[in-house]
Image (spheres, rainbow, N blue to C red):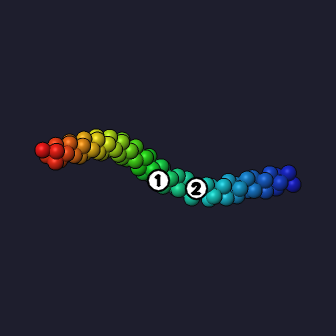
């Protein structure tokens, strides 16, 4: 009789512990979907940032080329002005 009572008490303790565990885990599992969405957003932003970096590199090369052409044009104008002044 006493051992049956101890068995029921132990079983009740295990059941209550499982209920508490489920109650504690449920909110955490609910937050996982939010974390997954945030992770996907961050990965998308990372891809966008990498694409922007590539575009910036191309623009920098274009600006460097334009700067060289502008310097060459200035030199050419200086030569033309010097030629007119010498006449």
Q: Residues within 10 Å of mark 1 (few under 14, many from 20)?
A: few
Residue at the (48%, 55%) spot, across then down:
34
Residue at the (82%, 56%) spot, across then down:
5
| Residue 31 appears left or right of 13 | left
Q: Is disc 2 placed on a helix, strand or loop?
A: helix
> Does residue 62 show up?
no
Residue 67 percent across, percent down from the top left:
29, 45
87, 56: nearer the viewer: 87
Residue 29 percent across, percent down from the top left:
55, 53
- Read off the residue under disc 2: 28
Residue at the (74%, 56%) spot, across then down:
12
| Residue farthest toward the front in the current orientation of the protein | 87
Residue 39 percent across, percent down from the top left:
47, 49
Q: Nearer the viewer, mark 2 or mark 1?
A: 1
Circles 2 and 1 in contact, beta carbons < 8 Å:
no
Whole-number angstrom distance, CA of label 2 to CA of label 1: 15 Å
| Residue 82 appears left or right of 5 | left
| Residue 87 appears left or right of 78 | left
Q: The C terminus is located in which quarter? A: top left
> Does residue 34 show up?
yes
Residue 59 percent across, percent down from the top left:
31, 44
11, 64: nearer the viewer: 64
Q: Is disc 1 placed on a helix, strand or loop?
A: helix
69, 9: nearer the viewer: 69
- Read off the residue under disc 1: 38
């Amino acid at each position: 009789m006493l051992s049956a009572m101890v068995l029921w008490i132990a079983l009740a303790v295990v059941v209550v512990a499982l209920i508490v565990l489920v109650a504690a885990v449920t909110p955490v599992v609910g937050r996982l979907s939010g974390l997954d969405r945030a992770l996907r957003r961050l990965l998308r932003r990372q891809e966008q940032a990498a694409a922007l970096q590539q575009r910036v590199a191309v623009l920098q090369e274009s600006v460097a080329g334009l700067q060289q052409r502008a310097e060459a044009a200035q030199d050419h104008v200086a030569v033309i002005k010097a030629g007119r002044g010498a006449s």
